[in-house]
Image (spheres, rainbow, N blue to C red):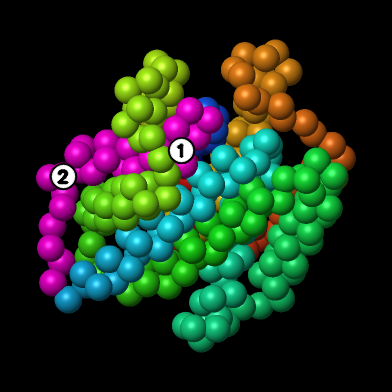
Amino acid sequence: MKTRDVFLVLFMNFAFGAAFISAKVGVGEFPPFLFTTMRFLIIALLLLPFLKIHHGQMINILIISFLGGGIHFSFFYLALDNSKYISSVAIVLQLGVPFATILSVVFLNEVIRWRRILGILFAFSGVIILIFEPTVFNDLGGVYYALLAAFSMSVSLLFMKKLNNVKVFDLQAWIALISCIFLGLASYFLEQGQASIIMNATLKGWIAVTFTALVATGIGHAGFYYLLTKYDISKITPLTLLAPVLGIINALIISYFSLIGGFSEVISYKIIIGGSLTLFGVAIVMMREKNKKMPESP
């Protein structure tokens, strides 16, 4: 890999890692569905020129947009809103890759060998250890939502494999539009006081919304897809495992120095062991999956 691309990989992971922080700040100021709606509204407006009809593929595109967009990010932001700790959410989200592997075997008749089976066992073992960490055990709502977020994205990958000649930003435009409509309706029916919250939002809240939309999509996803045009998937996707690690480190630094209110991240040997097992297992699965797309970061 060229030196320039190595720096791009680091920049991409820093963007995804920082997006965990901005998303946590955002759901502290806005209700989760409202925050996610505004994030996708920004993306939808920016990608409007890429909104094209792909005849014969729109059903799959709509299912992907619903599961991999609205449903996935609903659970992701609910996970952040219901958890004190970014570490558990960031680690559990990585189970999307083992989930996708299991689903591909069941529904697509793909064959996996012992190395990937071992990776799946490592990944789930790590999550079990993580769940029984006392600080996380008292925060299981966030873990459960993170599991649902990982699973919904994995299911969407089954339909993504059926797409032909649909460009990245064409798909992203549909995901943003459908997600914005779905989440907007969810916010209308399930949340209250949206107008008042928007009118009284602080600059920090608006920065969180804008940063999450532009950095996670404009830098993180754009850099990821650019690298995929130059290198094999099996070489690039393991590198994104750095993102949750950076997100956890960022949260720990913010908590230790009290840089932003609302952060009380802690670390323990169970979190370290459980997180390491999960990330190690996911890395094994990803390095053996040469044709599988990676679930997207916040």
Residue with the mark numbered 2: 48
Which residue is found at the position 40% from the left and 63% from the top? 67
Q: Is residue 33 covered in magenta?
A: yes
Task: Name the mark nearer the viewer: 1 or 2.
Answer: 1
Which residue is found at the position 41% from the left and 40% from the top? 192
Between residue 41 and residue 230, name the one nearer to us. 41
117 lies above or below 67: below
Tag 1 secondary structure: loop
User: How many labels were placed on the picture?
Assistant: 2
Image side of residue 211 versus residue 91, left or right: left
Q: Is residue 269 covered in magenta?
A: no
Name the kind of residue labelled 1 in the image.
Pro
Which numbered disc covers residue 107? none
Residue with the mark numbered 1: 31
Which residue is found at the position 27% from the left and 36% from the top? 42
Mark toward the start of the polypeptide (1 vs 2): 1
Residue 33 in sight from this viewpoint: no
Which residue is found at the position 32% from the left and 23% from the top? 199
Which class describes the residues within 10 Å of circle 1: few (<14), some (14-19), or many (20+)? Answer: many
Name the kind of residue labelled 2 in the image.
Leu
Q: Main secondary structure of the magenta part?
A: helix
x and y, in percent, of residue 50 in the image: 16, 49
Read off the magenta span: 26-55
Image side of residue 51 versus residue 179, left or right: left
Between residue 17 and residue 21, name the one nearer to us. 21
Q: Report the residue that reaches farthest toward the bottom.
A: 109
x and y, in percent, of residue 105 in the image: 55, 81
Tag 2 secondary structure: helix
Image side of residue 159 versus residue 27, left or right: left
